[in-house]
Amino acid sequence: MRSRVNRRLMAGVVAAGIGALVLSGCTGDIADDTGDVNCDDYTQYGTFEGKTVTIGGTILDLEADRLVQSWSDFEKCTGIEIDYQGTSEFEAQIAVLAEGGNAPDIGIVPQPGLLKRLQAGGWLIPASDAVVANIDQWWDPAWKEYGTVDGTVYAAPLMASVKGYIWYSPAEFADKGYEIPKTLDELKELSEQIAADGDHLPWCAGLESGEATGWPGTDWVEDFVLRQSGPDVYDQWVNHEIPFNSPEIVKAFDAVGEYLKNPEMVNGGIGDVSTVITEAFQTAGLPILDGECSLHHQASFYETFWNPDGGTANTVGSDGTVYAFLLPPVNEDDPQAVTGGGEFPVAFRDADEVEAVRAYLSSDTWANNRVSLGGVISANKGVDPDNASSELLKQSIEILQGDTTFRFDGSDLMPGAVGADSFWKGIVAWVGGQSTQDTVDAIEASWPTS
């Protein structure tokens, strides 16, 4: 378990973006294998001795080390050197860099809304035939649409996440007789029971994420809209076929507010309600390890953050240190519905070596390589779920490959002025005390008119 001091120190380092620059030659927790490589899987991409491809994105720390390792054999077999630079400010800076002609060759964009904004600026290169062929072979058609603008495909999906997980300690649940809730009402009752037991506040949460501060709160709202009002209303909301301040959205905000704005519910192990805004999302769930909170809402990718030093002391599993259950439906017999996210490698430079890299990243070979390294999943249909590094990630891959109702993260689909701006900022103001109605009215007013 990590001490309170260490957890806060980690939060300061992450929030400040110290060490955000990650290069392909970096050292980290994954050693570079310099042995012989079987290049049979890589001959289709060609050889490009002396060529360099730069990649930028939001992926940091251990996850960035693993990303770099995932293409190490590709580099050796094709001769392409890949330089990766990660920063928490990528989303805020990439359009400025593109406009100035300083964008990386490839940008790993985490939002279809941002992809559309970059395309509207005239900066993106359409995906090559090889990339499109991989999308058609390995991905559900819905994922293809997320990387498409006006009928032109600009990017294949990369990694994915299943959102709406509630992380908890299996040992605490067993010791105290807590049961996994099967409905939203049961989740509320469980939270109230934990609060009444008096050992600690039930929930721990954090919205801080640099320029993207607030996004974890949007995930809460999206999960409640999907479960309370269903996928049709969710789609109408995301596409602005109903206004942002519709009664269904107000209902979801108010339901989330019973947790995030309630001093009897948060912020266990961290502070009062105001600390929900200032606590880094990377560290917000760690009080569970110290027995200072019981529940934390975060996506499947949060598995990586349970061992922030890259170790293995904390295990993820039904009998491990931590595990997670999906946010339940309104009624026990309702179909399971989940939200999720993913990234899209867009190209800013038209070159064969750039498209070779993008073709590899859209393949089942890359997806299995990366999933095998641990901590992430992919919706690529060629991924073997058994390659996942934990019971939870295997389950998440099976969810993405199955018949579960899936909807992409709503804020990622909305126009950037909303999904990556007013919605994030609105969540912060709302947790800080602004009323639900004032919040949704302000976000609605920010929606672009064209």
Image: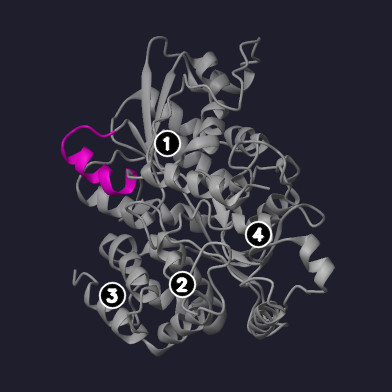
Amino acid type, callout 4: Ile
Secondary structure, mark 2, is loop
- Which of discs 3 and 1 lies nearer the camera? The answer is 3
- Which of discs 2 and 1 lies nearer the camera? The answer is 2
Secondary structure, mark 3, is helix
Find disc 4 in the rendering and name its residue. Answer: 288
- Image: 356 above or below 5: above
Sequence-first disc among 2 and 4:
2
Which residue is at a point 46% across and 76% down the rendered structure image? 234
Q: How far is disc 2 from disc 4 in space, using C-alphas?
A: 17 Å
Bin the neighbour count of mark 1 within 10 Å (Cα to Cα): few under 14, some 14-19, many 20 and up.
Answer: few
Q: How far is disc 4 from disc 3 in space, using C-alphas?
A: 33 Å
Bin the neighbour count of mark 2 within 10 Å (Cα to Cα): few under 14, some 14-19, many 20 and up.
Answer: many
- Which of discs 3 and 2 lies nearer the camera? The answer is 2
Sequence-first disc among 4 and 3:
4
> Which stretch is magenta?
90-103
**Is 331 situated left or right of 107 in this image?**
right
Q: How far is disc 2 from disc 1 in space, using C-alphas?
A: 51 Å
Q: How far is disc 4 from disc 1 in space, using C-alphas?
A: 47 Å
Q: How far is disc 3 from disc 1 in space, using C-alphas?
A: 39 Å
Amino acid type, callout 3: Ile
Find disc 1 in the rendering and name its residue. Answer: 129
| Disc sitting over residue 273 in the figure | 2
Sequence-first disc among 4 and 1:
1
Q: Assess whether residue 93 is covered by the magenta stretch.
A: yes
- Image: 293 above or below 3: below
Q: Looking at this view, is 244 or 158 the one in front?
A: 244
Bin the neighbour count of mark 4 within 10 Å (Cα to Cα): few under 14, some 14-19, many 20 and up.
Answer: many
Find disc 3 in the rendering and name its residue. Answer: 443
Q: Looking at this view, is 420 or 398 the one in front?
A: 420
